[in-house]
Image: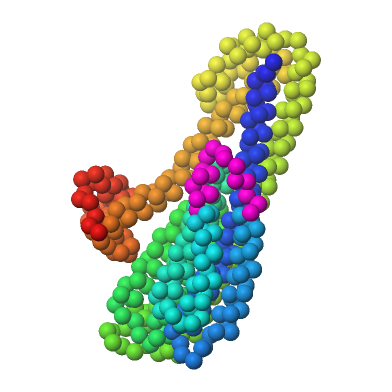
Amino acid sequence: MKTGLHFLIAAKRCEIAELQELTQTSALVRVTARLVHGLQRERGLSNLFLASPNGHWQPELDEQVAACVAMQQELLDGFGSMDIEPRLGQGARLFSRVAYVMQGLDALPALRQQVRTRAWTPQRATQAYIRLINGLLAVVFEAADSAGDPDISRRLVALFNFMQGKELAGQERASGAAAFGSGRADAATQQHLLHLIDSQERCLQVFADFASDDLMRAWQQAQQADTLAGLERLRRVICTAAPGQVLDTGQTQKWFDACTARMDGMKGVEDRLADELQGLCAQRQELARGELAVLERMLVASATAARAAQRSLSFFEDNAVTTLPPSAPAPPTWATPLDRSILDLVQEQARRLQTVSDELDTVRASLNERKLIERAKGLLMAHRHLGEEAAHKTMRQMAMNQNKRLVEVAEAVLAMADVLPSARP
């Protein structure tokens, strides 16, 4: 006959299985981050190659492509090791993201051929890379959204937002490289760069909200004053250029190097965060296995206990299991030490699960806000025929005009979805 202790052991084994899955997912996220960083550099070099004459930058681009091919295979190996049996939770969304990314990776050689033959403009190539990188970031997003441990989830949220901010920095590098390489920056390019700069700061603020103190110190140390000063100067050159003003193409290398130095510093922080994440997964597993061993020893001991009736009555004497007050009353004095231990464990498990649920709700609020904002932005894009930047700018202006948070505006926009006219083809 199964007892409460049997189910406590089953719960702990489920927890260990979830932690093992989280450990594997965290390792996959780390490989994904490496490939994203490689593709970001490949995108920047592709823009330099496409924007400059006489095949400049081709050797550097070829070398980066080779590095990305190796990282891509490592990621595919990671996908291949995933357990894809049907399961509860976020499996369907995560697996859909992986399927999408694999399609993009299959198409990557064709994209590279378009770059090599100069068949595409820098702008078109940039958008193609962005689409693939956003797909990879969506895998990280789903991993963060599916984590069941609040501390691990918190670090995944920090990592996702940091990677998103770094991706926006990479887009800035690519767009600026194309502008300097071609010797011109029109108003659309200037507005795009300002949007990227502003969006980076918002992502990095969310990262700061969820990162550990050690990571925040690492991030502050990674921001070299001389690198930032040089980048700010070049940003002003592009963003304040008058219509028709010719940019100095000789600044192209300086722009690329300044952006790259900043992104490499960010990659160091990203690696630290990935290390912290995997270390926490290992720590949680070790702790859970130790707790399981204690429960299994108690199960063996309980087989020789002869006070089943008293154990049953002790449940009714101690109502902490059902009401969960801050401090539970002591079990009856006639309960055996084993009885008291099991009751304590049941109470502790119930409190811990409630705490975990509350903390996860807090952590996932950031992810849920992002989902709402993205949905509202998509609705505006469809019904007002706006681009992504214009839709986001519209929502931000609405938030400022109404003195509301962006997520509140997003909720209002989505609430109007049913009364909006159908989008015209």
Q: Is residue 367 visible?
A: yes
Residue 336, compared with residue 66, is above or below; it is above
Q: Pick whichever, 235 or 130, lies toward us.
A: 130
Res. 329 image quadrant:
top right
Q: Residue at x 71, y 32 (%)?
A: 292
**Figure quadrant of the C terminus:** bottom left
Which quarter of the figure has residue 180?
bottom left
Q: Residue furthest top?
A: 309
Coloration mode: rainbow
Asked if the stretch drawn in magenta spans residue 112, the answer is no
Q: The N terminus lies in which quarter of the figure?
A: top right
Does residue 176 appear in the picture of this structure?
no
Please state which of residues 247 and 52 is positioned toward the viewer in this rendering: 52
Q: Would residue 168 be found to the left or right of residue 313 on screen?
A: left
Seen in the picture, residue 269 relative to 250 is either above or below; the reply is above
Q: How many marks?
A: 0
Q: Locate residue 112, reporting x and y percent.
A: 52, 75
Taking the magenta stretch, the answer to whether it contains residue 85 is: yes
Query: In terms of depth relative to the viewer, which is nearer, 75 or 374?
Result: 75
The location of residue 234, given as percent across then percent down, is 42, 81
The correct choice, above or below, for 14 with respect to 236 in the image is: above
Using the image, determine if residue 408 lies above or below residue 392.
above
| Image point (35%, 71%), residue name | 192
In the rendering, at what x and y percent does residue 50 appear? 46, 82
The part of the chain drawn in magenta is: 80-97
At 40% across and 86% down in the image, what residue appears? 182
What residue lies at 38% left-to-right and 87% top-to-bottom? 183
The picture places residue 257, in percent across and down from the top left corner, at 52, 80
